[in-house]
Amino acid sequence: MQKSRRSTRIQLLVVGGLLLAGGLGRSAGQEIFLSNGDAWPVVPMSPARADDAYAIYSLLTPQLFPNTVLQHHPLWLIADTTLVVASDLEDPRTAITPPPQQRQAFAPVLQDYAQHRYEHVHLDSNFHLDQPYRLLDQTQVLALRAKILSASARQSSTLAAPFQGALGLVGFSNVYFNFEHTLAMVYVVNWCGPKCGQMRWIVLKKVNNGWNVLPWATRPRTP
């Protein structure tokens, strides 16, 4: 069953690499808007993808912030629909540099991206996290954005209810796999204010039924 979607713009700041907070003004940064249009369908998570996709989402979510930050902001807020990462925003074929001996193995992952990149996948509460989390729909995402910008204007990192205890918003793309589900890639976005955020592709490999992040070089976006 598909849900109707209005066109939205979610403001995201590219910080580059894994920088998570502070220190990047408008003169050194670049704001990028992801536009999610009506032409891109919202679909349920495929049962064939669900177990591995939620395992990857659950693995990556705690890695977005240091533990020292989580002590003060224990609540995760996650967008309940995956982001469309169009090739003109961040093309994985140029952003990700697999080792030469892995290029052939990685090719089916890129093919999966080419086939499914314009799908918005609706996410359910199937994350396995040690900390509390909430999935936010479109209306709640826009409300959170307004509260974060308001708190930033007050030079505060504390959000009022109903988002109290959260630092920012986490968003994921669909997870793209090879045929055997032994290689995968996903785009991860964390937005926590006009001077706080990260956006990048992550590649993972399944080892002993678990997923590990690969240290493949990625080409950072120029701020």
Image (cartoon, grey):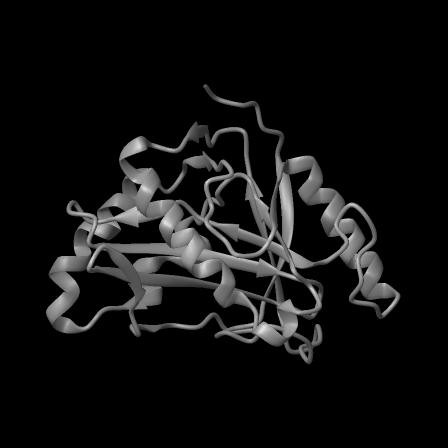
Residue ranking furthest to the top: 1
10 over 205 or under it: above or below = above
Q: Which of 170 and 55 is in front in this view?
A: 55
Q: Residue at x 45, y 28 (%)?
A: 41
Q: Position of residue 118 (x, y in %)?
A: 40, 38
Q: Where is residue 37 in the image (x, y as percent from the top left)?
A: 55, 35
102 over 115 or under it: above or below = below
Count of picture labels: 0
Q: Is residue 144 left or right of residue 132?
A: right
217 over 157 or under it: above or below = below
Q: Which residue is drawn at 41% across and 58% down?
A: 59
Question: Which image quadrant for residue 215?
Answer: bottom left
Residue ranking furthest to the front: 130
- Quick one: quadrant of the C terminus? bottom right
Q: Is residue 65 left or right of residue 105?
A: right
Q: Position of residue 98 (x, y in %)?
A: 23, 69
Residue ranking furthest to the bottom: 23
- Quick one: quadrant of the N terminus? top left
Q: Where is residue 132 in the image (x, y as percent from the top left)?
A: 61, 51
Q: Is residue 31 left or right of residue 205?
A: right
Q: Nearer the viewer, residue 57 or 179?
A: 57
Q: Residue at x 31, y 32 (%)?
A: 47
Question: Which image quadrant for residue 216?
Answer: bottom left
164 over 101 or under it: above or below = above
